[in-house]
Amino acid sequence: MKQPNLPTIGCAFALCASLLGAGCTGQRPQLQPREYRVKIAQVQHCDSIEIAEFAGMVKEAQSVNLAFRVGGAIMRIHVIEGQQVRKGQPVAEMDPRDYALQLSATQAEYDKAMDEINRVKALYERQSVAEADYQKAKAGELLIQAHLKRANDQMADTKLYAPFDGYIQRINYRPGELVNIGMPVASIINVEQYHVGIEVPAALFVLRHRFHNVSCTPTIGRSEPIALEPIGHEVMANSNRLYPMTFRLNPRANRSIVPGMEVKVQVAYRPEAEQRTSVPADAVFNADGQVCVWVFNPADSTIAQTAVTPDQLAANGTIIINEGLSGNEFIITAGVHSLSNGLKVVPIAPKAATNIGGLL
C-alpha cells in the first residue's frame, strides 16, 4: 500500500493557515452613519379671538328741533310726521306780512340815508365839508346797512328749512298758531348715519384697544352682520357698573334697520396681549409625561426636544401653543417618534410651486 506524501500535506495545511491568518488580521469596512432627512416648518403666530355678545339699541345720530328765529303766526306746514326730507327742503312758513312791511320801511330809510351820505362824500372830496362831518356820514352808512341786513334776515327767517337729509319725527304746531322765537315747531332726525349703543363690563372695557371687529344683526328677520365703527365711550361706569360705548352704523347697509330697533352686537376681541403660536398636529408628541416638539437648530443641524403647553386644536388642523415657543423656531413636522435629542438631521427642502408632482 502506497504511503501518502507527508510533505505535500504539510504544505497544504501551511497554505490554509496563511490564508486564514490573512483573513483574521485584515481591516473591516467602515459603516457610514445614517442620514436623517426630516421635514421642517416654521412656527406660526396665532392670534386668539373671542366673541362677546350684547343687546344694543339703534339710535339716530342726530336729532334737531327746528324753530323760527322770529316770532309770529304759522302760515304753512310743508311736511307731515314720518316724511323723508332733503337738506334745504321747506318745512314750515310764517306769515311774513309784518316783516315785509318792516323791510320796506328800512329799505326806504336806507335809500334816503345813502343819498345824503353820498352827497357828503362828494363834498369831502372837493374839500367843501369838514372831516368830522365826513366821519359822521361814514358811521351813519354802517348803521343803516346793519338795519337793512337785519330786516332782510328777519324776512328770510320767516321760512324754515331742513338742515340735513332726514325724517320729520314730530310736528308741534299747526297753521294759524302763534309761536315765539326759538319754540320747536318740528323735530328732524338724521338718517345719514345711525348710532348703536351697548353697555360692557369693566373686564371687556379695559380690552377695548384689542377689539378686532364689531358687528350687529337685527333681532328680527334674517340679515348678514353689519360692521360697526367705534366713535366714543364713557370713562365712568353707570349705576349698573357698566360702561356705555357707542358705534356708528351705516343705514345703507340694511334699509330695514331704523332708530329704536334692537340689535345683537358681536364684539370680537383679543383677550391676551401676547401672540400665541400654532404648530402642525403631527409635530407634537408625548415624552416623559410632557407634550413636546423637536426644534431644529440651523447652526449645527441638530434637534432639541422642547416641552410646550398646548391649548386647543384649531379648525385648520394645527394645535395652538400657549407657552414654550416664541414663534421664530423651526420644528420637525414628520417622523417625530423615531428621533432623539441632539441628533443631526438634514432638512428636506420644500417643493417649488412650479415643480408639479415633485418630479424635478
Image (cartoon, grey):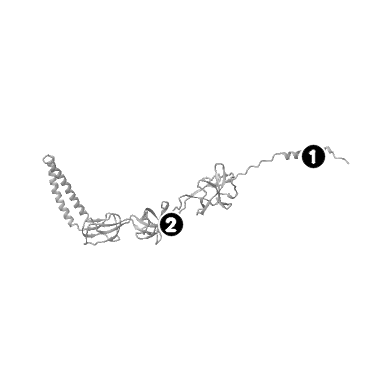
Q: Residue under circle 2?
A: 52
Left or right of 151 on screen, residue 42: right
Residue most extreme to the right? 1
Name the kind of residue labelled 2 in the image. Ala
Q: In this rendered view, identify the residue nearer to me: 114 or 255.
A: 114
Q: Residue under circle 1?
A: 13
Left or right of 259 on screen, residue 130: left
Location of the C terminus (image quadrant): top right
Mark 1, Cα crowd under 10 Å, few <14 / some 14-19 / many 20+, is few
Q: Distance between the residues labelled 2 and 1?
A: 95 Å
Left or right of 265 on screen, residue 162: left
Residue 152: which numbered mark, if any?
none
Whole-percent x and y of residue 252? 36, 55
Whole-percent x and y of residue 279? 52, 50
Q: Nearer the viewer, mark 2 or mark 1?
A: 2
Q: Which residue is drawn at 43% across and 57% down?
A: 52
Name the kind of residue labelled 1 in the image. Phe
Number of numbered discs visible in the structure rendering: 2
Residue most extreme to the left? 128
Whole-percent x and y of residue 99? 18, 55
SS for dot 1? helix
